[in-house]
Amino acid sequence: MHLRRLRDLTEFEVADNSPDVRGWAVRGGDGNKFGDVHELIVEEASLKVRYLDVELDASLNVNHHERHILIPVGVAALDEEGDNVFVPSLTKESVLEYPPYQEIQITRQYEEAMLRSLQLPLPEAHIGSFYDQDSYNEQRFYQNRRPDANEAFRRRIS
């Protein structure tokens, strides 16, 4: 499995110069909160965060088994001062149409469904990696809160 929850990788941690966004409020383009970052989904081989696992607010009256969604890290942005994550392409209402994440292996079909929900182009087959596109560029996500281009997570120092 190429993508893992950071909490399952006990030998890794969030890097010192990167904010740990787990627990931060997630807000849509309308500014309204629709959930909280529950976990980071990472690609261990590249030391890159690929998705934010967002737990939707109970106030949205979503079935308990469909309360998690994945947001590609490059479509979100960090608040410069507060502990908020913004996803401009979603609103509190549109997130109800987003494909739910059920903590099983992330398939390419699911990833493509997410991109379609966000009205983003699917990567062309000849591109080297599926994640070589702006939607998965963690530098776009961290640019307001991290001064340099280091990894978002790292191997724990013993």
Image (cartoon, helix red, strand yellow):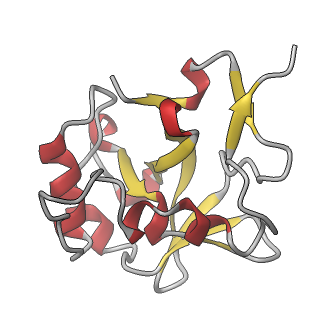
Q: x, y (%) of residue 55?
A: 46, 46
Residue at the spot 26% in from the left edge and 63% down from the top edge: 96
Reply above or below: 154 against 119: above
Q: Nearer the viewer, residue 68 or 113?
A: 113
**Residue 72 x %, y %:** 40, 58
Q: Quadrant of residue 138?
A: bottom right
Most foreground residue, 76 or 54: 76
* Image quadrant where one finds the N terminus: top left
Relative depth, front residue between 94 and 117? 117
Q: Nearer the viewer, residue 111 or 60?
A: 111
Q: Where residue 118 sits: x, y (%)?
A: 27, 72
At a point 78% along the width and 22% down the height, the residue shown is 156
Q: Which of the 4 image quarters holds residue 12?
A: top right
Q: Image height check: is 110 above or below 115?
A: above
Image position of 137 (left or right of 92): right
Left or right: 54 in relation to 37: left
Q: Is residue 43 visible?
A: no
Number of marks in the rendered image:
0
Task: Please say if 103 is above or below 128.
Answer: above
- Is residue 14 visible to the viewer in this orientation of the structure? yes
Residue 39 x %, y %: 55, 39
Say which residue appears at 45% left-offset and 81% top-offset: 88
Instruction: State the quadrant of the C terminus.
Output: top right
